[in-house]
Amino acid sequence: MAEAAAPPAPEFTAQDVLCVNTIRTLAMDAVQQANSGHPGAPMGLAPVAYTLWQRFLRYDPQDTRWPNRDRFVLSNGHASMLLYSLLHLAGVNENHLKEGRKAVTLDEIKRFRQLNSITPGHPESHLTAGIETTTGPLGQGVANSVGMAIAGKWLAANYNKPGFEDLFDFRVYAICGDGCMMEGISSEAASMAAHMKLNNLCWIYDDNGITIEGHTDIAFTEDVAGRFMAYGWNVLRVSDANDMARMAGALETFQKTTDRPTFVIVKTHIAWGAPTKQDTNAAHGEPLGDEEIKLTKRFYKWPEDQKFLVPDGVYDHFKNGIGKRGAELHTAWKKKFEDYKAKFPALATQIQEMQDRALPAGWDKDLPVFPADAKGLATRDSSGKVLNGIAKNYPWFLGGAADLAPSTKTKFTFEGAGTFTAKTPGGRNFHFGVREHAMGAAINGMCLTGLRPFAAGFLIFSDYGKTPIRLAGLMEIPVIYVFTHDSIGVGEDGPTHQPIEQLASLRATPGLIVYRPADANEVAEAYRFAMTHTHEPAIFALSRQAVPTFDRTKYAPASGVAKGGYVLADAEGGKPDVILVGTGTEVPLCVEVYEKLKAEGVKARVVSLPSWELFEKQSQEYRDSVLPPAVKARVCVEMAAVMGWERYAGPTGEIIGMRGFGASAPLKDLLKHFGFTVDNVYKAAKKQLGKA
Amino acid sequence: MAEAAAPPAPEFTAQDVLCVNTIRTLAMDAVQQANSGHPGAPMGLAPVAYTLWQRFLRYDPQDTRWPNRDRFVLSNGHASMLLYSLLHLAGVNENHLKEGRKAVTLDEIKRFRQLNSITPGHPESHLTAGIETTTGPLGQGVANSVGMAIAGKWLAANYNKPGFEDLFDFRVYAICGDGCMMEGISSEAASMAAHMKLNNLCWIYDDNGITIEGHTDIAFTEDVAGRFMAYGWNVLRVSDANDMARMAGALETFQKTTDRPTFVIVKTHIAWGAPTKQDTNAAHGEPLGDEEIKLTKRFYKWPEDQKFLVPDGVYDHFKNGIGKRGAELHTAWKKKFEDYKAKFPALATQIQEMQDRALPAGWDKDLPVFPADAKGLATRDSSGKVLNGIAKNYPWFLGGAADLAPSTKTKFTFEGAGTFTAKTPGGRNFHFGVREHAMGAAINGMCLTGLRPFAAGFLIFSDYGKTPIRLAGLMEIPVIYVFTHDSIGVGEDGPTHQPIEQLASLRATPGLIVYRPADANEVAEAYRFAMTHTHEPAIFALSRQAVPTFDRTKYAPASGVAKGGYVLADAEGGKPDVILVGTGTEVPLCVEVYEKLKAEGVKARVVSLPSWELFEKQSQEYRDSVLPPAVKARVCVEMAAVMGWERYAGPTGEIIGMRGFGASAPLKDLLKHFGFTVDNVYKAAKKQLGKA
């Protein structure tokens, strides 16, 4: 590790300092006005972020969606005012956006942290023009940035062509703080980034020595530089955040580093310039106070009583810096892309579709249809076939598992699929390692960069990576999770590996759509629908154990999945006396009981309910047609926590589910032990009929 | 980092190798018989674990609960057969246990992974005598071991006295694999352990180069030794796992290291000796197959056709090694403890109570009672007072936050509480750093060692540490979580920080008891009850914002909390026409609406439902008395996902909850925006009355 190299030309001037202090004072004023927020980090980091934006970032404020723009991530999202100030001063606008995201105006800065503003407490990418990812939960942003850098490598490998070697060559920068460094996710992500030799990735560490409880040395005394060198990063140090020339030197070194990601440790001072609060945790998460602000402005030689001041020349300075550079680079790129279109029209179309989250024509033409089969196959197996069927015709659909691909059956095996490695960055199979948390955040970053990624693992381990799943819901991005081993069906591995509450947890999380398909054709139909999501993460819960493939000439077609729930098998005349409701592997059980009841002349119905969220989106009329309110005799069956099933069981229905942990045993023994048997469900149905 | 030092006497002999191969063959045979499991890691690790157990571990097989025993953790829990073999061969029995945990007999090894065996797929501490912690989800065990080492330091600081300097001086050993190393939790835990200078902690890293997807170098190429040196560990390497003398040397070096934890990297061969499967991922998670087993046994010079063979002399060899040493050490300790009892009877009583999970006499005598107060205080604030009130009289109740103590109000401020640091290991306030995941696993380890720990953070970040919470439920240990900022009441920090689905998720998790108290006295009563848990984790969801302290002369006493739910305010005569059900900060809202309805002559009831789990444990009669089935007009109010509320709302009741993410805004604006207002709840109640 070395102190950063000598400063590049041109020198930084008073005008630059004026811009930096504008960022600082906007942050101070906005937090004070909101009476809430984090002023200290923006004040300390302003010269660092300014140097990056003004001198390095290849970013066009007139088009925040330019595909080859450099990406900037604020992983310490509580420093949101730093980002809002930069977006505003750089002149990022909303004119080019269709989606309703808005630009940060000075009025929006004044409405920091207010209802319906686009300047919330932490940056939200679905609200605000120019924000690349939603951050706040610590460590997420840096891990997102790894995904963005992966996407950069992947796009370059697949779309750069002779004469167009730099169509995709963007870099990814992330600023992070001590909290990000302490969270395990940053370790996972850093290890992964170095393994993948992502030399297009630069993390800038705000080493201010302060956390909420006080000095970092009360809890955090590791050698962060040494740790990153051990991962395999290039580590640089800038000993004074206000030395913008030195910071520029570090960024130049990053740009010249070809074989590894770069980690720049910048010694900053939280709330730099605040006479009593600099270098204290008092400056972390609350307003400085009017008097302290006045004194700080005095120190900056700033008009003491002016709030939200953008001095003359500041906008122009940004315009002549990042604005001009970005416009020129973007214009040149657009021209290049026109030439590219002419030479590689099919690839150019893909690039466009990616940006629009559109599906390529014919993406579903190899989606398998599975013949009826009493023996059947595990839904993880049918999923594997479906994934391969889709991927063949959907070039930017890609992903991998947290070291579980042989178990999750998520490997793309067709010719040319390849594996993503440092040497083969165009591959579509990813080895994320045993790093569920970073995997989730990485696919968020990949998705935000236009790719269509999936992540795979055991459902139980969704707990390890819950936060990125939630954030995908908040960001409204269509990532895909393939979670297998979705119940006590795991069998011998036992309760540590058997999910119980995970389905309830994911169903309760806003923005997600959870699918638990019942057989191979439901799997196919679930993917068919999920791939059309443009704003919702799709979560698949799939089985380890085999389930029969239903004879769809006898039962209803699997296309009902698209409605979330549908009548799979019905009483003659459609007037059931009892309804059996199941999801996933419990649907075949319901069907067996249905057949038994039918043989006895009982009017029964089976409802397959693979997606509660989709079902709830249907009209009341449709839902009532599937679950007629008048039919109170109901048995709901799911090998998971019963939480939430009252909605479908109604006040008198029976819920056959899990009310405790599972156990380690062969599946057949577990099914008997926990009551997931034909006998038990049959008895429950009869009891329900007796009551009705 | 150095290769481990020269071997100590006595030398290892053929008898030792016989014992090692017994461990190996038992693992092979058990996995084969179960037709499921992980043979490779036990085979590779057998000499390592054997050396530790036979030569170093201060452990009495006749009493697995000896307070000063060394702790052994198998963090790569899938290698469970290694542990079961060791427990069996070392002669661990169940005679000393009251709790119903059973010893591993040869029969139990033959019933590996079968229903109702005590040899499940992954080690479960609540089932099996001698298992210190439940492992399987990767990285948990090593982080548990940090908590155990913390507990060792804390016990020594508080209970060792002149003449009794070694009453507590146990060491903690954890074996871990590549998966543990890749998971972020191990990074958090390792950083924490080095910061705390836990020289009583030794991790042994099974560096076998193989994971499920193949060689580790497909995903994991960091310099693990360098990383641990950067954390501040002493790093040793043993280049051949079969070189037991060298391994012994490493453990001797560990025992002499005074200023930091020790990390021993042992180069192992997965499935050592298996002719075609050694060093391959095929040996990780499936039986070797009969033929491979035969050939492996041949390589070991083992009777090829004998299964579950324990050769003559093996039991005796263990008895003369770990057995004899453990018995002698334990006997000496018991004698010492008798002397200690005589000199320090009060402290000795504490040690005994700790082991029994008993509360000290008078623990609740300073539990505050809060006077009625319309302005009131946040439940995080009343929690802070209650925690301090309890802690004063409960010496081994201790804990801390993930860098949020000023916000969670969890600091013990009374005289002598102190802070746990490397220099002051007797302190009771912990700075866990921004490491929610390791914090949770650490308190599991602390609790398993007899302390009564709590961990604190924001409810949203329970997602970062969900797995240890779940495992505490599975292990049936009474850890405590103090989660504040429990709803959109977080306000300006916005949706990244506002929990929505977390309550549902925790309520759906088996074994936990979740409390969301409504006012200061409910907080006190909730803690009063939670402290009596001996086998259930308690999860507190507490508010950032103030709530009134109810006038309990006017409303029912807060002691109703112990029943999970109770009638707080009722219609005259106890015959309500409408029931308002709330938890936490929404109960005052229900009370306001109740008063308004009452003023109009409407017969209303308010049910405060702080703990669903406790309420469900009550008799049907009690539950029906609180929520009479005949009263269908119900409004349930909670600022969280509605998932699960149908149970209490009934088929026609209204649920006022969250159906999406929150937003960044001042609280008062959010309440209005999301409908948590008197007006809205009142309207809902009237609508319900209209229907009824």
Image (cartoon, coloured by chain):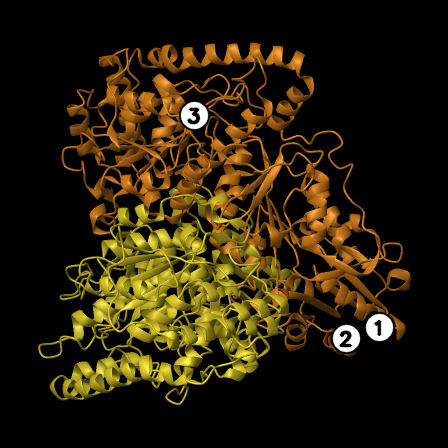
Chain colours: A orange, B yellow
Q: In the rendered structure, the residue with mark 2 lies on which chain?
A: A
Residue contact between numbered discs 2 and 1, judged by CB atoms under 8 Å: yes
Q: Nearer the viewer, residue B295 or A101?
A: B295
Left or right, residue B557 beside residue B634: left
Q: Secondary structure at mark 1?
A: helix
Q: Nearer the viewer, residue A205 or A324?
A: A205
Q: Is residue B18 above or below residue B313?
A: above
Circle 2 Cα neighbour tier, 10 Å, few/some/many (<14 / 14–19 / ≥20): many
Residue A682 got which mark?
A: 2
- Give how far apart the Cα atoms at labels 2 and 3 are: 61 Å
Q: Quadrant of residue B132?
A: bottom left
Left or right, residue B276 beside residue B243: right
Circle 3 Cα neighbour tier, 10 Å, few/some/many (<14 / 14–19 / ≥20): many
User: Which is in the foreground here, disc 1 or disc 3?
Assistant: 1
Q: Quadrant of residue B669?
A: top left
Of callouts 1 and 3, the N-terminal one: 3
Q: Quadrant of residue A117?
A: top left
Q: Which kind of residue does numbered mark 1 sit on?
A: Lys
Q: Which kind of residue does numbered mark 3 sit on?
A: Val
Q: In the rendered structure, the residue with mark 1 lies on which chain?
A: A
Do the residues at discs 2 and 3 belong to one chain?
yes
Circle 1 Cα neighbour tier, 10 Å, few/some/many (<14 / 14–19 / ≥20): some
User: Which is in the foreground here, disc 2 or disc 3?
Assistant: 2
Q: Which residue is mark 3?
A: A104
Q: Is residue B574 above or below residue B682?
A: below
Of callouts 2 and 3, the N-terminal one: 3
- Give how far apart the Cα atoms at labels 2 and 1 are: 8 Å
**Image location (x, y in percent) of residue B84:** 46, 75
Left or right, residue B658 beside residue B513: right
